[in-house]
Amino acid sequence: MLVIPLHLGVLNLCPRGEPFISPVGVVETCSAKDQCPSDYWCHQVGFSSSGLCCPLPTRTVHSGSCPAAIPLLDRASSCRFDCRADDDCSFSEKCCYDGCGMHCKETTPSASGGDGEDKKQPVVKPGVCPYFDERQCSGKSPFNQCGSDEDCTGVQKCCSDGCTKKCLYPESNSACMQAKGALQMIGQSSGIQCRPDGSFEEVQCDADYCWCVNQFGVEVEGTRTSDDIAPNCRAPRKCPLPLCTHDISCKFGMKKDSNGCDTCECSSPCDGVICPDTSVCVPAPVECVAGPCPEVNVSTSIGKNSNSRCNGK
């Protein structure tokens, strides 16, 4: 493991929390998970040819590697962060450090052995493309905007609209991808973490807390922690029954306090969602490919195939 002195000009490259700093005040780099403390993961972004040990939970990691980049301390004040982790980029890209900020870059494939290069299998994202009648096409040959799902950002898939291929939101998907897609439409997709197969990551985080969820994405009571501490999903704390002044029936469950325990207020899929100034958030049902699908922040008045997930006032 390499050690790099901690300079004031080096920006924090972790998706959340602070990178691990040794007792002597240096940022320790890593090239594998086992080189980090037990509650950290190796975020390999090309920082001095390696990565940084960042607080759990682990974010989705795309295949390939980032090119090595040495910190350019004289440019730190003007650095931009277009991403924080690979799942902020399309499936064919990684979130890489360029010596100043973080940007989505095409991956550098690992070296292959044998007679030639390994053939890269196309990425197929979860979900079903919306149906369009090809007979409605004018007969022209328009330019395809994508070739496969990996050319599309976030949860979007490369779908045919009857005439050409373009990046569209899937019509039906897993519960996690539906929730993430709803937030992606308003630029907040980092609020939901999904596995590559479309299921929920066991640990979810926002700007303030982390917590555990079950297979349906419902928060497990008593697992909420501050964002710099990984929750223990195997040993949730015991929560007292909330002392409410009246009986409460909540369609989406109860709001949680800072310990992840139930309160006397009802929660909503729209909690924490920030819509454009001219819109409000409205929970509505969506279609999932399998099992029950909880409502997300979808407008019931705009239409099923609309690109807006907030209802205009």
Image (tube, rainbow, N blue to C red):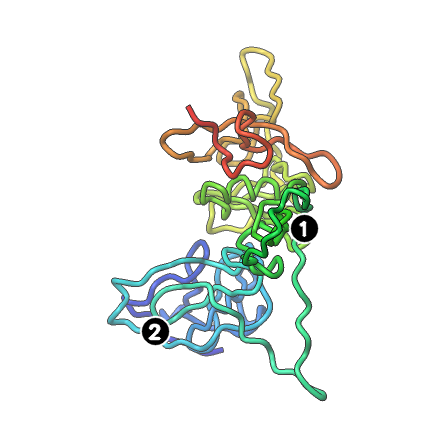
Residues at marks 1 and 2 touching, judged by CB atoms closer than 8 Å: no
Residue type at mark 1 is Pro
Callout 2: SS: loop
**Callout 2: few (<14), some (14-19), or many (20+) C-alpha neighbours within 10 Å?**
some
**Left/right of residue 158 with respect to residue 29 in the rendered view:** right
Q: Which of the two discs, 1 and 2, labels the residue nearer the N terminus?
A: 2
Residue 251 lies in quadrant: top right
Counting from the top left corner in percent of width and height, residue 202 is at 63, 48
| Residue 126, label in figure | 1
Residue at horizontal 41%, vertical 62%? 13
Residue type at mark 2 is Pro
Q: What whole-number distance in Å separates the C-alpha atoms at marks 1 and 2?
A: 37 Å
Quarter in which the C terminus is drawn: top left
The answer to which of 122 and 54 lies nearer the viewer is 122
Residue at horizontal 58%, vertical 45%? 169
**Left/right of residue 269 with respect to residue 130 in the rendered view:** left
**Callout 1: few (<14), some (14-19), or many (20+) C-alpha neighbours within 10 Å?**
many
* Above or below for 296 versus 204: above
Counting from the top left corner in percent of width and height, residue 253 is at 60, 26
The answer to which of 159 and 277 lies nearer the viewer is 159
Residue at horizontal 65%, vertical 44%? 235
Residue that label 2 marks: 71
Q: Is residue 23 visible?
A: yes
| Residue at the top extreme, as displayed | 246
Callout 1: SS: loop
